[in-house]
Image: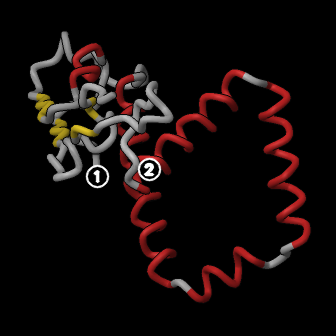
Amino acid sequence: MTTEPRLCPYCHQHFHPCVFRPDQRVCSKPECQRRRRADGHRAKCESDAEYRQVCRDSRQKWRARNPGYQRRYRQAHPDYIEANRRGQQRRDRKRRVSDLVKNNLAIDLKTISADVWLVGPELGPLVKNNLAISEVMILQSVAASGGKLN
C-alpha cells in the first residue's frame, strides 16, 4: 500500500510517509525532525504548566552541577561573544525605534512647519506618533534578514 506524497512544513520537499506511521506530517531529514521535536517541546511548555516547571527545574539543577560553564564557553568561543554583542546592538536599536512610537514628550508635528521623514518598511507604526523632535529624519535599513531592523 502506497500513500500520497506530502509536503514537509519545514523543508517544503515532498515525501512519502512511513508505512508504519501513516499520519507522519514531517519528512525524515534530521533537521526537520529536530525542528518538529523543538516545536512540540515549545507547544508542550506553553500548554502544560507542570511540564514547564519540570523543564525549569531541570535547567536549574544542570546549572548548579556545572558552575562556571558559561564563563568557560565564552572564553573558548570569542566569536560567540561578538555575535551576541552585535545581536544586542540590533535589539537595542529596534527597541529605540519602538520607543519612538510611544513618544509623547516633544513637539507636535501637526502644528509645526519642520520636515519629518519616516523611511523604511517597518516604520508604519510611527505614523501614529504625532509628537517628535522637529527636523528629524528616521531611516530604517533594509537588511538581507527579511527586512528586520539592524
Residue 60 horizontal/vertical position (percent): 86, 55
Residue at x 80% of width, y 33% of height = 51
> As drawn, is 18 to the left or to the right of 8?
right
Looking at the picture, tell me which residue is in the foreground, 73 or 85.
Answer: 73
- Binning the other alpha carbons within 10 Å of mark 1 as few (below 14), some (14 to 19) or many (20 upward) gives some
- For label 1, the residue is 150
Looking at the picture, tell me which residue is in the foreground, 78 or 35.
Answer: 35
Q: Tag on residue 2?
A: none
Residue at x 42% of width, y 59% of height = 87
> As drawn, is 6 to the left or to the right of 96?
left
Q: Quadrant of residue 108?
A: top left
Residue 30 horizontal/vertical position (percent): 43, 56
Q: Nearer the viewer, mark 1 or mark 2?
A: 1
* Secondary structure of the residue carrying numbered label 1: loop
Q: CA distance from mark 1 to mark 2?
A: 9 Å
Q: Tag on residue 92?
A: 2
Looking at the picture, which amino acid does disc 2 mark?
Asp
Residue at x 43% of width, y 35% of height = 19
* Secondary structure of the residue carrying numbered label 2: helix
> As drawn, is 96 to the left or to the right of 5?
right
Q: Earlier in the sequence, mark 1 or mark 2?
A: 2
The N terminus, quarter of image: top left
> As drawn, is 125 to the left or to the right of 78?
left
- Binning the other alpha carbons within 10 Å of mark 2 as few (below 14), some (14 to 19) or many (20 upward) gives few
